[in-house]
Image (tube, helix red, strand yellow):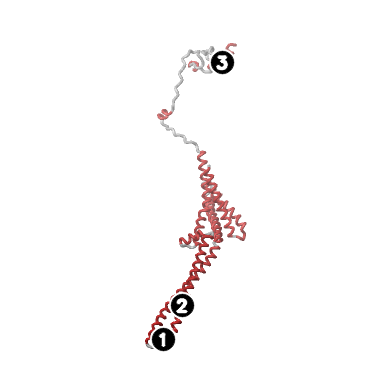
Amino acid sequence: MIFPFLILLSALFVACISGFFSIFGIGMLFSGSMIAVMLMACSLEIAKLVIASFLYRYWNVVNKALRIYLFMGTIILVMITSIGVYGYLSRAYAKAASFPESIQLTLNSIELQKNSTNQLIVQNQTELQSLSIRRTDQENRINTMYSANKNRTAKSQELSLSKTDANIKLDQSSIVNLIVKRDSLDRESAILKSKVSTTSDIGSFIYVANSIGVKLDTVVKWFILLLVVVCDPMSVSLFIAYQTALKNRHNSIESPQAIPKISADPIELTSMIELEPEPALETTSIGSGVDSPLLKDHEGPYYTNPDFDWSNEESWKYNPEAVNWRRNMIGA
């Protein structure tokens, strides 16, 4: 009896949890009249389990039309309650995901700043490279002019060279500042990601999503679908399993023991039946008592036989009719 009780306990527990999720989930979908909708969902939950049990017990008894209607109704009720479970779990996920979503927006903004910073670094590096080439050309021209005694022109080129050096220093300083900014953004992004993974209620889902390279919403959606597929049909299956275990237990108690088959062969019957030996006939005299073979051939009571031995009192004194018979004979 313990195992069927465990099945019933498990079925009730799963049904209560599934019903709670389903009833509140359906009620949240129709928040305008939440209490009335929850009462309707509660009645549907109970009806679903009762109909499933009824179909299991009386499948071969009810007519075909009613059987088909109840079966289809049970399937539809399972789908409805499953939608309620999905709605409840989705709403719970939406609440838990509000904090990570705000952090995700910040991370997206940081990522945009990093991209623009990298672009500026690349532009400054390209400009620095072109300035370095220009400065090399200017130095070569200045040396050539001094060699040709064009001192005035060479001095003007030196002014241009000093401007180029100033631009080079400016670009170098700008590149350094941009690199520092990019590193700062990287550190801020790492801190926010760590905060989401450690303090968020859905940190495990975030880790799984990052590990397999799938969006967080996709991972949570499939996880909720797996729960929905298992939860509500499992409660119905456990109730049917309980009734199956209970029915088998009753059958094992009420079933009679098997009766061994006896062969109809006379020879085998003779060998199986133990015959009792016939009692030996007593060889007493005619008047020896009731068991005398000659007295047994007399029609009527044994004591009316003329050959009955009345001297053997043990054979007649305990029989009232024999006693009365003897008294009548003596009186006559």
Q: Is residue 20 visible?
A: yes
Residue 69: where, in percent of width, then height? 54, 52
Q: Is residue 14 above or below residue 179?
A: above
* Mark 1 / mark 3, whichever is N-terminal: 1
* Mark 2 / mark 1, whichever is N-terminal: 1
Amino acid type of the residue that numbered disc 1 sits on in the rendered structure: Ala
Residue picked out by circle 1? 154
In terms of secondary structure, where does tag 1 sit? helix
The front one of 200 and 205 is 200
Q: Quadrant of residue 128?
A: bottom left
The label shown at residue 317 is 3
| Residue at position x 49%, y 63% in the image | 215
Q: Nearer the viewer, mark 1 or mark 3?
A: 1
Amino acid type of the residue that numbered disc 3 sits on in the rendered structure: Lys
* Mark 3 / mark 2, whichever is N-terminal: 2
Residue picked out by circle 2? 169
Amino acid type of the residue that numbered disc 2 sits on in the rendered structure: Lys
Q: Are marks 2 and 1 in contact (CB under 8 Å)?
A: no
The CA span between labels 1 and 3 is 174 Å
In terms of secondary structure, where does tag 3 sit? loop
